[in-house]
Image (cartoon, rainbow, N blue to C red):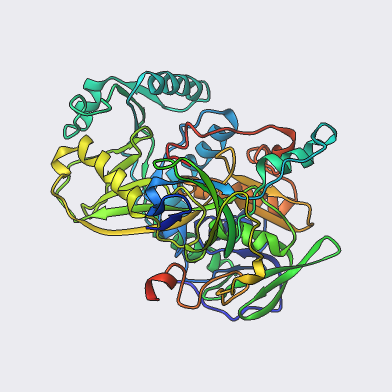
Amino acid sequence: MWKSPEPKKTYDVIIVGGGGHGLGTAYYLAKEHGIKNIAVIEKGWLGSGNTGRNTTIIRSNYLWNESAFLYDHSVKLWENLSQELNYNMMFSQRGVMNLAHNEHDIKEMKRRISANRLNGLDTQWLETKEIKRLVPIMNTDNLRYPVLGAAYQPRGGVARHDAIAWGFAMRADEMGVDIIQNCEVHSIKTKNGKVEGVKTSKGLINAKKIAVVASGHTSVLAKTAGVRLPLQSRPLQALVSEPIKPVINTVVMSNAVHAYVSQSDKGELVIGAGTDGYNSFTQRGGYDVIEETVRAIVELYPIFGKMKMLRQWGGIVDICPDASPIISKCEVKGLYFNCGWGTGGFKATPGSANVFAHTVANDEPHRINAPFNLERFSDGRLIDEHGAAAVAH
Amino acid sequence: MILINCPYCGERDQSEFSNGGEAHVARPENSENLNDKDWGRYVFYRDNPKGIFYERWVHTHGCRKWFNAVRNTSTDEILKIYKLDENPPSKESFTNTLKTPSGEPKVGSGNFTVKK
């Protein structure tokens, strides 16, 4: 699969965080920018953070131009990733549906669909009877918040979350990237406003450039370099049921009742909730949040009422005030951040890695990620995606 | 699941409360003279430590009163609850249970309170 080398004394680029985004950044740096003296440093095993904890939903139906370009760049990369990495991503474009439960939802979604279509995205409006045809098990009228329609993106879908970490890791490793697992970065060492290296559990490792892709822990690491980021870390929970025969062949999300569900190839229902309402790093979350989600799921799909849940877990997501990510340089020279993905980073993995590699290699953002800078929190050019984020922040 | 000891109502389930984010964020006195950067810092930037965190809660489904708490965000242990007109306890009065600089408890994130 990949080697487990001891860290060298110095690298051109150190990537902190061995999830999909970090490994992808290493892959694109090596492949597209010819930088091969790279280390990816991961405190656990590859994909043990949010890459292994999400509900694998992929879509690009975001409202604003900036986000639509970024997320659709990613969906387009997903479409060829199995071939490019010669590793099966199990990318299944089974469609993603966002349900509308009230008048406001309908207006907001139709506005978003119009914006999406202007940006060339394949989003469309579904009436309730069309939803019923696609998902016959859904209870659309006999519930507290009836289903009044949906925004539907057929190119959306799901993929295997481990595959993207392993696929990027294998190809990066072949190009000479050092993948260092079970090595925790404790702090970022800087001198005269420039990075020098990272202090890790395996000692000091020097680097010309440091790219931090540590999701929930990004702000903790940034602080060691004296950088403050507008991030808050919160648990986001998910759960899976016992496996059953195929009953739902698309992804159904609902912002209003806080529940989303899809069925894995093994037959398990993969269910996601909103974030817990307080800062925490416990990777656990509170029971009341999944209780609310399961209540909504059972109301929407009465046949799931007697199912047993197999596992529940939490991941720590880093949330930006405008629910959009930060892919940016900062005031410390040679230090780059790819963070703030909040509840929706998985779908963006290849696109984010691709433009972040460009940013790190050229010390200049790619035109796609230029708007996702840190300056927007002082000049006011926020990219407000609370509506399209589809999960309560 | 956290139990929160409301200073007015006693111990209740966390789902009765809403979190108000970082406590003791003072509005800048000279806001009319602030530049965009400093104003942005006040509006959008909040502490996000792994470990000791001073925060606000409101008992939404109870007495609806606000109060402050000190919580260890790596374990969710509530270390101290105090009313809005009380002085915050000093950070030094809490023992740091974090084993590494990035704040990972020795037994693994999240297991600290369970194992205790």
Looking at the rendered image, the quarter that the C terminus of chain B falls into is: bottom left
- What residue sits 46% from the left and 40% below the top? B64
Looking at the rendered image, the quarter that the N terminus of chain B falls into is: bottom left
Looking at the image, residue A269 sits to the left or right of residue B44; the answer is left
Q: Which of A245 and B94 is in front in this view?
A: B94
Q: Which of A362 and A48 is in front in this view?
A: A48
Looking at the image, residue B79 sits to the left or right of residue A146; the answer is right
Q: Residue A89, can we see it?
A: no
Q: Which of A188 and A351 is in front in this view?
A: A188
- The part of the image, by quadrant, that contains residue A382 is top right
- What residue sits 86% from the left and 63% below the top? A192
Looking at the image, residue A68 sits to the left or right of residue B29; the answer is left
- What residue sits 35% from the left and 39% below the top? A258
The x and y percentages for residue A341 are 54, 47
The x and y percentages for residue A109 are 42, 23
- The part of the image, by quadrant, that contains residue A48 is bottom left
Q: Residue A66, can we see it?
A: yes
The x and y percentages for residue A50 are 46, 57
Vertical relation: A359 (above or below) B103: above
Looking at the image, residue A368 sits to the left or right of residue A347; the answer is right
The x and y percentages for residue A153 are 38, 31
